[in-house]
Image (cartoon, coloured by chain):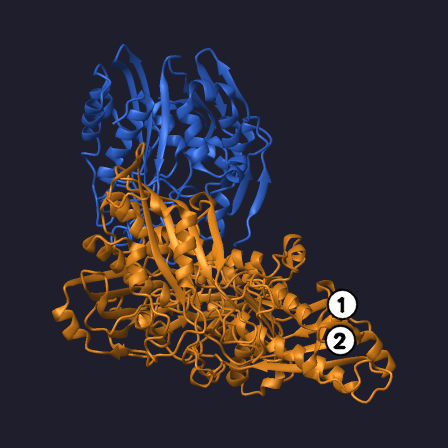
Chain colours: A orange, B blue
Amino acid sequence: MSTVESRPLIGEGISRVDGPRKVTGAAPYPMDFSVPGQAYGTLVQSTIAAGRIVRMHTDEAAHSPGVVTVLTHENALEVGTGPASVLGASPPAPLRNDRIVHHGQHIAFVVAETPEQATAAARLVRADYEAAEPLLDLQDPRAEHLHDPWGMDHSRGDAAAALESAEVTLHSTYLTADNTNNPLGLFATLAVWDGDTLTVHDTSQWPSMVRASLAMAFGIPESSVRVLVPYVGGGFGAGLRAWPHVILTAMAARMTKRPVKLVLTRPQMFTSIGHRPSGVQWLSVGIRRDGELVALDHRSLSSLSMEDNDFEPFSSGTAFAYQCPNVITRDEQAKLNIAVPTSMRAPAEAQGNFALESALDELSYTLGIDPVELRLRNHTDVDPRNGLPWSGKAILECYEIGARRFGWSDRNPEPRSMRDGNWLVGYGMASAMFPYFAQPCMAEATVNRDGSAFVRSAATDIGTGTYTVMAQLSAEELGLPLEKVRFDLGDSDMPDSMMAGGSGLTGALGNAVHDACRRLVRSFVDLVRDDADSPLMGISPHDVECSDGRIHLMGCPDRGESYVDILARHGTPQLSATGSSTPPDAKEIGLSLAGAYGAKFVEVRVDPDLGLVRVARVVSAIDGGRILNEKTARSQIIGGTVGGIGMALLEDTVTDPRTGRIANGTFADYLVAVNADVPELDVVFVGEPDRGTPTGTKGVGEVGLVGIAPAITNAVYHATGKRIRSLPITLDTLL
Amino acid sequence: MRTFDYVRATDTQEAVRLLADDPAASCLAGGTTQLDLMKDGILEPPRLIDITRLPLHGIERRGESLHVGALATMEELAAEPIVAERLPVVRESLLLGASVQLRNMATIGGNLLQRTRCRYFRDPGVAECNKRSPGSGCAAVMGAARMHAVLGVSERCIALHASDLAVALVSLDALVHIQGPTQRRTVPLTEFYITAAESPEHENVLDHAELITEVEIPLPPPTARSGYLKVRDRVSYEFALTSAAVLLVIDGGTIRQARVGLGGVGSKPWRAYEAEHVLTGAPVTTATFLDAAEATMRDAWTVPGTEFKVPLARRTLVRELQTVAGVTS
């Protein structure tokens, strides 16, 4: 494994390479693609949550102006089910039968010559139902439960006995609401068949998985499917599955022998592409009076749809967040008649961390120990699950620097002791982490005879900056100026990439790019191994480095030559190499792979008469390992923080308790934080390059959100003396 | 969207005649509500009469009244110096009522006629809506009710009138000038609206072939102070959970005149006469304000999810009375 210590921890904060295209409108998002002769699809969705369709009435719609076809379960093509992934089984295929399992389930697909005609005709499709009573309440005893669905339940020591004998105990219940990912870009699919070859433009965070799903759905080889997604208007996890509407669009295109385009409406974005599931968590903590944790018993129940999976082990982080000898974590999911939950930024950890960090805050008051100090007393440098040292964990630095920047020492620990006019002022903090995650990843690097390079992988840039940081990394590895490197992504024909999810892409793809570039340099060195005209003749590929478009002996820039000269002399137009990365094995490297860490400090203002909560300041100190681009990484933390403010104060996908219909499925009714809700956000990166991977990076896509909600509720307690254990804190909560 | 005819009226008489000729036609002004409702399939007028070219844009002071053309935009009214000087409550309600993009499009007449934001009304997939289909029932009463009204409602409909401006205007005794096919008439804004309890499907006294031409706002005494407080979860871009429009004339520690409107609570913009009775002649103290607030909301009809609006509306009123009077708690 190569060392990265010679490189700066914080990479240059350059602006996005795709920025000008985005701000000028030149960047094509999935909904921007059109092809000649295309027809337009519209979804018709169920208006009951459980039961079956007795009869579909489609005649009126079928004879409506411009209508090409109306698909229902009675005439739909039978399609296969896609592959299982790390996120579980593939979502169920659309229009399979008459069974209804949630309100908003697709029951018909209308194809017409214009979007307006399709929309008008879709309103004419009616269904007769035989309705059953839906299961909608998470704690409904009739709901079927999945126990430990991800095999991540953890147990060490004897938590029950330790709780029994603990000097101080806390037993609390925490509730978190359904939240909806709500990327600004409406999800879109354009499917074009040419014989048995399928090309699809799709809003996806994982094109190769969509390719595999479409291939299995239609029984064609993966080599006959191409999925294109050069730009994504946000995803937050919603683009990690091959959703039924994607299969439906391709099915309609196959059946009508026309290209078909579908753009979801905003209300359909609430029912078709997942959401963060609601949950209830029961947490028991045993602790000594000196603040040392002796027992943690963390259990969760979260909502799940009837026919799909969702990776949501709420309590799993509690197994290794702190030093504690006796721990038990147990996660369950309840099957309900709700639209499919899915990963939403910081899945599981956002919710589990809220419970754990709220409980620690509560105990800090009980014990009279400063909240930061309480966490310091329970810090661990090793992974308590396996005893291995973490590959990188600078959380102590996060506490120290975060507290200093925030002015934590100015805090009067007494609740309700700080005031500014009508506003009560409170300070709160929380620890944050997001666990390590990676999947196998590949990339290809090419240097051309003019000394320019392109590097490519079937990854996506969901607004995170993948284009930019991978171009930077490639330029660094190849010793080229940034403007000579083009990084391409968003095409499933490119070398396979992992998903843009789990905060894993930058690390895994970065390591694959690193490997590809190293191999490419090696092929140049191989080319001149016996070349008497080359100053590099006979030099080992391990002894070279690259700068200014040249390969040269390490530490000796004069002994070397340029890519251009080598290729010209050998009459070779270009050289390419493919690289790959696989997640390291902890036992093999003797390190437990660490994700990102952080400490969050928040000041809130609470108007106790009107119940208003406003976030006044946030300081996020983050250990993200080596930061490739400070500007894009900071944007990730800022964006995550805004999502955390939304989760804490505003976001709540409300399901009608009687019908299962989502009652606030628009941007007027579902509240996300707007600029006026977001104060100045201070972000500081600390730590060292991670020791577990070649590039030393950790993903920072999710750690920005984690810990914000408990830091806010903890600050609300400090301001008001009122402990909030249910999110979001709408103003009626505080009246 | 269904296809529809589009015609542009050139004068008010023609617009009224076009309306009279087609009982299903609708008017198009700023379009900020009308077009949304058409896209969502809630309104499907076969004919849209564009009234934006009618000569109803002016804002003019005549003596102690401000005459606001129905087609003046929210932004134009908010920018009038006389509004800032004499009608802060109107200005604040406009600025808090919509983003600048919407204020540049939305008209004053259209604002008064805006339809409810009720998500059950605005989703054609919901069958039970007495406002859309009289007699079909009310899904909101049994549903997620947090954003709905508690005054002037019944089990037949709890839809909220979400205008901020109208709350300020009812408190100021604004007048609505109306042009019909054969006659003009003037209706006080306090008598313009019909509550959902009276009739879910009829929201005001305007006949189909009548147009609002002008809103007349009597200017309060120069010594009056006024303001508008809007309470909501999100700092911006949200309809009021509760709001209060307050105008006070104070003389030597005594309230000589009081006007109070409440928003976020009524199926129509709510005038709180009962609070005004308590305030008038009373000393300028928080105790007075608490008494005034206590007098309001007594007829509230709540469902699970709207109970909090009763205490919140009272607290909102107390806070705005304190702010306008310059009294700290």
Q: What secondary structure is found at the residue carrying circle 1?
A: loop
Quick check: A547 left or right of A502?
right
| Quadrant housing residue A192 | bottom right
Q: Chain of mark 1?
A: A
Which residue is at the front of the view, B292 or A191? B292
The chain carrying label 2 is A
Residue A285, label in figure: none
Q: Is residue A42 visible?
A: yes
Residue A663 as seen in the image, left or right of residue A82 = left
* Residue occupied by mark 1: A548
For badge 1, the amino acid type reads Asp
| Location of residue A225 with respect to A718 vertically, above or below | below
Residue A320's spot in the image, x, y percent? 33, 72
Crowdedness near tag 2: few (<14), some (14–19) or many (≥20) residues, C-alpha within 10 Å: many
- Residue nearer the viewer, A663 or A236: A236
Q: Position of residue A351 (x, y in %)?
A: 33, 63
Q: Residue at x 48, y 70 (%)?
A: A501
Pick whichever, B120 or B74, lies toward us: B74
Q: Nearer the viewer, mark 2 or mark 1?
A: 2
* Discs 2 and 1 lie in a common subunit: yes
Relative to A197, A291 lies left or right: left
* Quarter that holds the C terminus of chain B: top left
Q: CA distance from mark 2 to mark 1?
A: 10 Å
Assess disc 1: are there few (<14), some (14-19) or many (≥20) residues with their C-alpha within 10 Å of its C-alpha. some
Q: What residue is shown at x 36% (from left), y 45% (from top)?
A: A603
Residue A76 pos. (x, y %): 48, 79
Q: Amino acid at mark 2?
A: His
Please, what secondary structure does the residue beneath circle 2 have? strand
At which x and y percent is residue A115?
56, 61
Q: Which residue is mark 2?
A: A552
